[in-house]
Image (cartoon, helix red, strand yellow):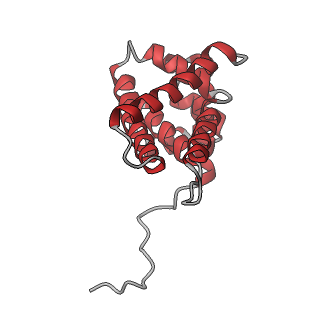
Amino acid sequence: MKDETEAPTRGRGRPRDEEKDVAIAEATWRILAEKGYEGLTFEGVAELAGCSRSTLYRRFAHKAELVEAILGQTSRRIEPKIDETMSPREILLAHARALCVYMAGPRGPAMLMMSVSAEHHADLSAAIARHGTNEQAFYLRELERARPGTSEQVRDFAFNTLIGNIIFHVACCAPH
């Protein structure tokens, strides 16, 4: 039986470089915003991120997998810290601010460009859908935590209203 106090063993190879993951994500967002999904290449990401293409291929099999990964990584990086003393209003505002941060900079235009490209690329469409399902589940759990006992219909309305308003602001009001 394994001793519970033992440190976990590390997998083969070098540990993942967190800074490199961030650089890869930021490079990917920038290319998506400027050139869209069609202009996204591992070569372009590697050049902007300061890594090799083999670094990318070790992490991602194809560009849809890269996109799905950066969507999730970015979400987790900007996720607000919620504690039990926060009111439902404070929790909702914290999540709204996090979503605004998510859509700031090149990410907002990149999301819009990807939504257009998804109509023509089934792999991208599936990656975005998987990410959206995961994010919606996360936010619906957060809304339930903020307002226990609220009906699913009310939570869905709150979620879609919040997301819709922020996306509208990015699409129509933010400087491009």
Residue in the picture at 41% in, 41% down: 140
Which residue is at 46% across, 36% downward?
Answer: 66
Q: Note whether residue 39 is visible.
A: no
Q: Whole-percent x and y of residue 137?
A: 38, 41
* Location of residue 81 by image quarter: bottom right
On the rendered image, what quadrant is the C terminus found in? top right
In the rendered image, is residue 100 in sight?
A: yes
Q: Residue at x 54, y 18 (%)?
A: 112
Q: Nearer the viewer, residue 86 or 36?
A: 86
Task: Left or right? Give the position of 168 relative to 6.
Answer: right
In the visual, does 173 lie left or right of 92?
A: right
**86 vs 31, nearest the viewer:** 86
Is residue 129 shown above or below 14? above
Tell me residue 17's x, y (percent): 58, 55
Q: Nearer the viewer, residue 129 or 82?
A: 82
Query: Is residue 73 depicted above or below 160 in this figure?
Result: below
